[in-house]
Amino acid sequence: MIRFLLSVVSVAMVCPLASAGGLAADDAGAKATPIELFEQRIMPIFKSPKPSSCVQCHLSSVDLKDYILPSHEQTFVSLRDEGLIDVMNPDDSKILNLIAMGEKDLDKGAKLIHARTRRAEYQAFAAWIKACCSAPKIRDLPSLEGGNPAPARKPDTVIEFTRKNRVVDSFGRNVWSQRMRCFPCHTPHELDESNPKHEKAIARHKELEKKFGQRINIFRDSPETTLRHLMVSSRKPRPGRLPLINVADPAKSLLILKPTSKLPKKHADGKFEKPSYAEPVSHMGGLKMHVNDQSYKSFMAWIQDYSRVVGEQYASADDLPLDNWYPSMQVLRLKNAPESWEVLTGVQMVVHAWNDAEKSWSDDPVAFTQGTVTPQKTVNGALFLLAPANVDGQDAWDREGSTLPTGRYLVKIYVDTQGRLADDPAAFLTEPDYFGQATVEDPWKEGFRDAKLLDGALLQK
């Protein structure tokens, strides 16, 4: 069975305190006792029905309330023993650095929305921690009997995985990278008025925008702003419409149903019916991707992941999916597919590199793609490269614009004859689905015209 190793990028958990204009401790309540500060400034955070500023950076799995216990002594000892309070340097306490991380958010909108809450939380904890560390009777309290009574929190790997920046990064790789399939109708920021070749596309987009309004502009100017738009618009879809992201049923998200749907029916006068936003969905842009091609797989993998993140479905590291795919412009094409492969059957092509030192193929794949059998008996797909493990804290290769270097590669072919992808579009096929393999050595080029070509008739078992 092929095993794809999970590669979760570690997130630095320390950020410097913001300078003037950002976060800073205040002098309010400087003469108050630790218990007074706790009752006046910490407990309101615990009792508030509103989420803490953690939601700015985390879509689930963590809330500042999780770190607060019923008494100020228990809360202090718990945080101290977890290494979240630095009794010698209170201003450098890790919990303050965690609260301050929102100051480094590249999403300016989210940063502004949560600024007031974040500042209040930071100042409350900073004042209380400083007061506790200045009181020897509290600072030197023994560890709590029976262990730390802090509420059970999810493992750090899950907390890091559910951070918004990880979800945005995944969105950029899996969905944003495929946005040109939706050009020009849904990609206004890709239109260039100085480019003569875009004149018709610009005119077409203006017509659509006039007819459908701003909702036609699915892809905004960046992955961050696009994801924010998708999240907000999906929370309260218009009556009679499926949401763009359907967290209850990912496969019924308009984000995936629209590009895989055909044109609306045409009337006798040649005019089309209005496009449908409920099942059966129709799309004025027509078919833009096939179910089970590489773009469909990446869209569905991301929608499923996002749904599980916001649905609090990840409990341990074992629950986390593979998230180390990086799109490339390198393409694999298989011709002369065997007659036993029915049209539209899903086919995965998995690439292993030759290890010259060990004189063997790599156990873990370095790339893969997925496509469906066409009526011409071909299978096409752009490669997703798989990031290797980090070396000394640094990525082993530059993820952006990466390509497979010239060398020997083994391509293993897996065919979904059992319909496994219908049940789980993000799944990887395994040994029972293995059909054959081929080796390639010529330099890799980019684009479908220069695709790496395999002959299905020559595959070896």
Image: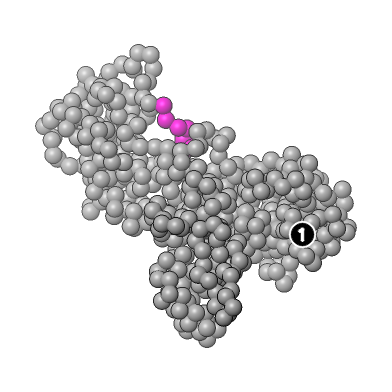
Residue 424, image x and y in percent?
Answer: 63, 45
Residue 203, image x and y in percent?
Answer: 48, 82
Between 444 and 330, which is closer to the camera in this rendering? Answer: 330
Between 299 and 122, which is closer to the camera in this rendering? Answer: 299
Q: Which residue is mark 1?
A: 343
In the image, what residue occupies the spot 13% across and 39% down?
Answer: 28
State the image quarter where residue 144 is shown. Answer: top left
State the image quarter where residue 121 is shown. Answer: top left
- Count of marks overlaid on the render: 1
Q: Secondary structure at mark 1?
A: loop
Extent of the magenta region: 152-158
In the image, what residue occupies the spot 53% across and 71% down?
Answer: 273
Residue at the extreme bottom: 196
Residue 182, image x and y in percent?
Answer: 55, 68
Between 353 and 136, which is closer to the camera in this rendering? Answer: 353
In the image, what residue occupies the spot 72% across and 47% down?
Answer: 419
Q: Amino acid at mark 1?
A: Val
Q: Is residue 340 visible?
A: yes
Relative horizontal placement of residue 238, taking residue 461 as reference (left or right): left
